[in-house]
Image: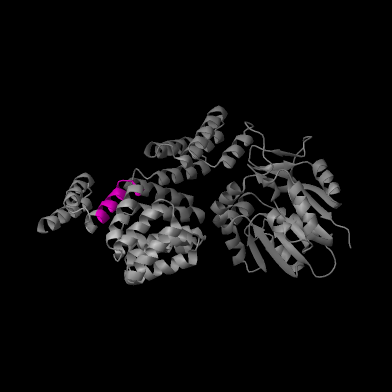
Amino acid sequence: MTDIHALLQQAVALQQRGELGRAQALYDDVLRAEPLNFDALHLSGVLARQQGDPGRALLLIDGALAIDAQRASAHCNRGVVLQDLGRFAQALASFERALALQPDYAVALSNRGNALRHLGHIDRALDSYDAALRLSPEYAEALCNRALALQSIARHEAALDSFGAALAVRRAYAEALHGAAVSLLALGKPADALEGFERALQLQPEYAEAWCARGALLLRLREHEEALASFRDALTVRPRYARAQLGMANTLRAMGRRADAVEAYKAALAFGADADTVGYMLAIMGAEQAPGASPAGYVKALFDQYAGNFDHHLVDVLRYRTPTLLVEALRRHLPLGELDVLDAGCGTGLCGPLLRPLACMLEGVDLSPHMLDRARDTGLYDGLYCGDMVGYLRVRPSSVDVIVAADVFVYVGDLKPVFSVARMALRGGGVFAFSVEEHSGAEAFALRASGRYAHSRAGIEALARSHGFAILQITPDTLRQESGADMRGLLIVLGTHAE
C-alpha cells in the first residue's frame, strides 16, 4: 500500500511539472497492481485531457466514479471534459453534482458558470462566477470567465474591469489580455486592442485565436499584408482552422486577388466554415449565384461585432442620414389616430428618437442581440425582439400601423417575402417606409462587391403593385458616404387601403 501511495505521489508531481509521459507510466504501474484504484483512474483521465484526448479522459474518469461516486473533484473534472466535447448540458449536470457533494467548491462554481455561459444563461453564469469569487476573491480564471460572460452581452466596460482584476492577480495571463483586447475593440479603441492582442501573443505564441483576432483587426485597418501574415501564423499553429482560413480569404478578396480568394474560400469550406457564409462571399465576387438574402448568421455576427462602435461609425464617419430622411418622408403620409409602430431591423435604436413621438406603441426587432442591448439602453422602445423580421411579422397579422426599415434591405435581395408579411401585418390604412441602395441596372436587385444589395426603382414599383400597396412616395437621395463618395439610395413610402 505504501508503494502504491508513493507511486501516486511521484506521478502527481510529474504531472504538475508537465512530464505527462512519465506520469502516465507510473499511473499505469499503479493500475497493473490495483486495476480499481480510484486516484490512478481519475488522474489518468485528467492527464488524458491534458494530452488532448477528451474521449479517453471521459472513459477513465467514469471508471473512477464507478468505484466511488462521492468524489466532488472527479465530477468536476468530468464536467470539464464534457465541455471540451461541447456537451454543455451534461457538463452542467456534472458540476451540479460536484456542488451537491461540496457546496463551497470554488472551481466547480466557476466551471458551472462556464457551462451556463455556453448555454446562453448569462445571468445565472454571472451568479456562479460571483459565488466562486466570494470563496476565492483572487481566482484569476473565474475573474476572466466572468469578464467573458459580460462581454457576451456587450457590457464591455464591466468586462474590462473584470479582465483587469484577473491580470492584477496573474500578470502573464494571455487569455485575459486577449479578452480585454476584444472589448477594447468593441469600444472603438483599435490601437489599444492591437497592443493587447500582441501582448497576448508574446506570452503565448501558439495562441491561434489571438492570431486570428489580430488579423481581423489589421484587415479592418486595411493593413492587408500584415493581416495575411497573421492569419497564416494562426494556420501554422492550428492547421485546418476554419476561422483563420476564412480570414485569409477575406483579406485576399480585400487585396483584389480574386482567384486566390476563391481558392481560399473553398479551402475554408473544406475546413468546416459555414457553407452559407462562404457561398455568400463567393457570390459577392461573382463566383456563385447571389442568394436571395445575406445569411442570417453572417449579419448577426457582423452587427454583434460592431455594436459598441456602430452609432459613432455611421453618424460621424459615414455621415449616415437615412433615419432622418426616412422619418421625414414618413411624416407626410402617417395614418390618423394612435399608432403602433415597428422599427424593423432596429439595430442600436438610431430611429427610436425620431419614431417615439409618432408612436403610441413602439417596438423593434433585430437579428443582433448586442445591437438590441444598445437599443434597450435608450429606454425608447416598449418591446424589443431578437429574430428575423419575416418570421416576426408572419405571426402578427393586422398588428401594426407603421413599419419602418432603415438601411435594412441592403442585406436582403429578394424582397418578395418581406413585402408579403409586411402587407399582412399592416392594418388598413397602414404605411410601410424603407430605404434601399439604388441599382441602375435592369435586374430587380444586385449583390455588390461591398456585400450589400441594391434595388431598382422599377423592381420596387412592381413588387408594391403585386402585393397591393399604393406607392405614396419614392425619392432618390444621398443616404451616407462610402469611401468618401455619396451613396445614392431611394426613400420609399407605401400604403395600404383603409378598411
Q: Left or right: 233 with respect to 406? A: left
Residue occupying the far left of the picture: 2
In the image: residue 432, left or right of residue 127: right
* Magenta stretch, residue numbers: 41-54
Where residue 309 sits, quadrant-wise, is bottom right
Residue reaching furthest top?
Answer: 259
In this view, the residue in front, 108 or 401, is 108
Q: Nearer the viewer, residue 152 or 390?
A: 390
What percent of the width, then of the height, locates residue 205?
34, 43
Name the residue: 44% across, 54% down.
87
Judge whether 414 appears above or below 339 on screen: above
When the figure is inspected, residue 400 is found, relative to residue 287, above or below; the finding is: below
- The answer to whether one can see residue 355 in this image is yes
Question: What is the x, y in percent for residue 352?
Answer: 68, 63
> Residue 491 placed where, x, y %?
78, 50
Q: Is residue 31 left or right of residue 371?
A: left
User: Is 52 included in the stretch rendered in magenta?
Assistant: yes
Whether 386 is among the magenta residues is: no
Q: Quadrant of the N terminus?
A: bottom left
Residue found 73% across the figure and 69% down from its top: 361
